[in-house]
Image (spheres, rainbow, N blue to C red):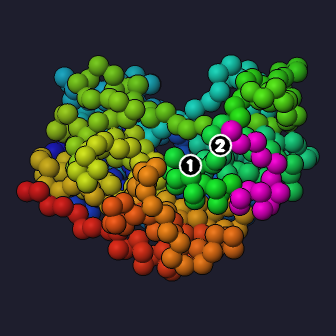
Amino acid sequence: MRTVTVVGTSLAGFSAAQQLRAQGFDGRLVMVGAEVHLPYDRPPLSKGFLTGKTSRADLALGEQSDYDELEAEWVLGDPAVQLRPSSAGVELLSGEHIGTDGIVVATGATARSLPGVDELAGVHTLRTLDDAVALHDELSSGRPRVVVIGAGFIGAEITSSCLDLGLDVTLVEAAPLPLERALGSTMAQACADLHRDHRVDVRFGVGVEELHGAFGHVTGVRLSSGEVLPADVVVTGVGVQPNTAWLANTGLGLNDGVLCDAGGVTDLPNIVAVGDVARCYRPDLDRTIRIEHWATANGQPRVAVGNLLAGSVVEHHTDVPYFWSDQYGVRIQFAGTVHPDDDVRIVDGAVEDRRFLAHYERQGQPVGVLAFNTPRAFGRARRQLTRPSLIVT
């Protein structure tokens, strides 16, 4: 390959570029990004950046020397709008056509928003740096009443940050318990109790019917129960949509992401996918899975890039899914995959103290581990779940 184009310049794309150089690719490297910013870290956006403890400079994923070492061509603020396999190229919004031999798809995902709210000021999603700047500015103006819709990791962290800023905040979640699908009902209850510990005004098991507004600005949130929550700022954390529209009608398999084999290779062998946009087959689970976590976006590119440069699948990505979250001063860490019927056993600490280590077991075998404020014990337990990458030459 003489030219490789990485489409997407967040963590997964930046990691892929670093891996291309580390694994010996010395040809033309083109980095295409929809945002105008150089690669930055997203996890702090809902935490330290909102509260003012983390600056823009702190978000950078690399120093200038790191970018210089890549010797890449950076095309920022000009998103890819079409993949053209017949001409081996990527077409950008500006009309520019980039001819390329290999492509790393790392276009990530876009935050979902509620229907019919585009014209209401004061309604936010949080996915990008620009989103975070806009939300930070609004939260810093006076003492707005905030409603957060969705008690997943983003919603919970934003709620925690609002509380840290001394704001009135209400957290709304349609499911009976927050994070129930990710953690199972037993440990989801611990997350619900964590919110209540800090006297957050919560509404669990109730949906959102519509947003009220006046003079173009949001004024309230009407719930399925009929209750109307007054609001000056509304933040929706209701999931994401993989950015795959530019790949339509290209021969690539698309199903809530780009379909890949266990090595990140798509239906077109000169194209691999990594990060939030990649739905890869997992032999250990016997199904495809799309993982929206920092650790996967950072680690997956090593395997995918190796397969791209080799021209065949020589390695599978089998790292155990891992994520963490910081809420109300509590570090929550999880590794593994959970089924609703898994057994959960507390092996250290106590749930009521918000300091514990829990093991998930399936048919007597460990399949996951969850920790509240026990990082060392979690690290040991996580390593026991980790298996070495599978070489499949």
The disc placed on residue 104 is none
How crowded pointer 2 is (Cα within 10 Å; few <14, some 14-19, many 20+) is rated as some
Question: Within the magenta stretch, is there residue 288?
Answer: no
Q: Helix or strand or loop: what does disc 2 sit on? A: loop
Residue at (65% x, 27% y) in the render: 114
Pinpoint residue 35: horizontal percent, then vertical percent: 52, 39
Quarter of the image with the C terminus in it: bottom left
Choose top left, top right, bottom left or bottom right for residue 356: bottom right
Residue with the mark numbered 1:
180
The disc placed on residue 176 is 2
Q: Residue furthest right?
A: 142
Residue at (36% x, 60% y) in the render: 362
Q: Is residue 377 above or below residue 27?
A: below
How crowded pointer 1 is (Cα within 10 Å; few <14, some 14-19, many 20+) is rated as some
Q: Is residue 243 above or below residue 60?
A: above
Q: Helix or strand or loop: what does disc 1 sit on? A: helix
Can residue 339 be seen here? The reply is yes
Question: Of 171 and 46, which appears nearest the observer?
Answer: 171
Choose top left, top right, bottom left or bottom right for residue 157: bottom right
Pinpoint residue 380: horizontal percent, then vertical percent: 42, 78
Horizontal arrangement in the rendering, residue 142 relative to residue 266 (left or right): right
Can residue 49 be seen here? The reply is no
Q: Amino acid at mark 1?
A: Glu
Q: Amino acid at mark 2?
A: Pro
Residue at (91% x, 47% y) in the render: 143
Q: Which residues are magenta?
A: 193-205
Pinpoint residue 249: horizontal percent, then vertical percent: 29, 19
- The answer for how far apart the CA atoms under marks 1 and 2 are is 8 Å
Is label 1 in contact with label 2 (beta carbons under 8 Å)? yes
Choose top left, top right, bottom left or bottom right for residue 242: top left
Residue at (85% x, 34% y) in the render: 229
Question: Of 148 and 313, which appears nearest the observer?
Answer: 148
